[in-house]
Amino acid sequence: MEKTPPQRIRTISELHRLFGLPKPEHPLLSVVLIEPFAEPPVIPAKLVVTDMYIISLKKGFLGPIKIKYGQQVYDFDEGVLSFMAPGQVFGVDIQKYSSPTQSGWMLLIHPDFFWNTALARQIRQYEFFSYSVNEALFLSAKEEATLTRLIDHINQEYQANLDKFSHQIILAQIEALLSYSDRFYERQFITRRISNHQFLDQVDQLLTTWLADEERLSRGLPTVQAVAGQLHVSPDYLSGLLRQLTGLNTQQHIHQRLLERAKEKLSTTSLSVSEIAYQLGFEHPQSFSRLFKEKTHQSPLAFRQSFH
């Protein structure tokens, strides 16, 4: 089956027509206030690419509206801020709404609006316009109010009779909006890093408890699937997060903790290598010795002898 190409939207006027909005006041800039609607707009293509910057705050979408941007699906059930740059493809999946309570705003900016200004060069340096940032920005009520005030100022200038000062005033408000967004993203990433490290503590505590439980180990080694199940996450998510935090996937993390426990037993007990292997959950001592040598470049016996 031939793949349908993305629907390309080249101008702000086209986007207004697509969403059934009045003609924009300015060809290169538009502020769209999102209001409740009984029926969602009809977008013919599943994939869309625009020639403009889109900064949007959407909240209260109780029915299923999903936006796929890069590798992340954004669910707009809560107030989140998202950023899209010209030429970036995003997917749209809109279904019938259960309750029309949506609100928020969209700021549409054609790149020509920045022509011959510092923002023309600087705007793509903001990381939140990159596919590599795979999550939307979740705002606190105070942060949302700060950005909405800036949008209100832009909208006032947009709706007024434009004069020679309007362009510079709007540019200053956009620059402030981007700077605040940068600050709020940094706050979110700090919070997320703390949360992730708390999750790493949970993984370490789980493996510590597991490897100290000889009865449990008698039934076999901890597996990636079992560890992920205990933490109520998918195996892929767990491995990806651990790799991000420690450089090791889940299997490597398990091996590292097994080797730490093995080294402790080799250096502080008189148990044989086979006994240690069985206690750690290995079905065959040879498998334990092979793993130990592969990871430490020493046999278990050579490691033990280095302590005497």
Image (cartoon, rainbow, N blue to C red):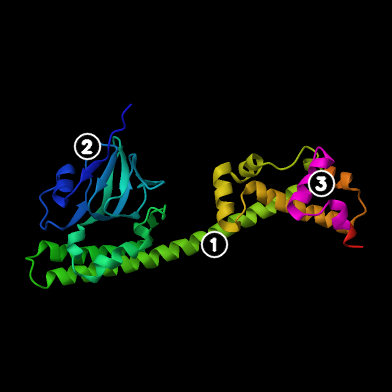
The amino acid type of the residue labelled 1 equals Ile
Q: Which residues are magenta?
A: 282-304
Q: In the rendered structure, which disc, 3 or 1, sits on the residue that comes first in sequence?
A: 1
37 to 104, vertically: above or below: above
Instruction: Write down the residue under mark 2.
Output: 42
Q: Are marks 3 and 2 in contact (CB under 8 Å)?
A: no
Which amino acid type corresponds to the residue marked 3 in the rendered image? Ser
Q: Residues within 10 Å of mark 2 (few under 14, many from 20)?
A: few
Task: Say which residue appears at 64% left-offset and 42% top-offset.
Answer: 224
Name which residue lies at 61% across and 46% down.
Answer: 231
* Marks 3 and 1 close (CB-CB < 8 Å): no
| Contact check, label 1 and label 2, Cβ < 8 Å | no
The CA distance from mark 1 to mark 2 is 41 Å
For label 1, the residue is 194
Q: Position of residue 47 (x, y in %)?
A: 29, 40
Left or right, 304 with respect to 37, comes to right
> Which part of the image, by quadrant, shows the N terminus?
top left
Counting from the top left corner in percent of width and height, residue 64 is at 34, 39
Q: Decide whether residue 17 is among the magenta residues.
A: no
Extreme residue toward the front, this view? 297
Question: Is 299 in the magenta?
Answer: yes
Kind of residue at badge 2 = Val
Mark 3–mark 2 distance (CA, rounded to whole Å): 63 Å
Judge depth for marks 3 and 2 and give the one in front. Answer: 3
The front one of 27 and 106 is 27
Report the number of numbered marks.
3
Q: Which mark is residue 289?
A: 3
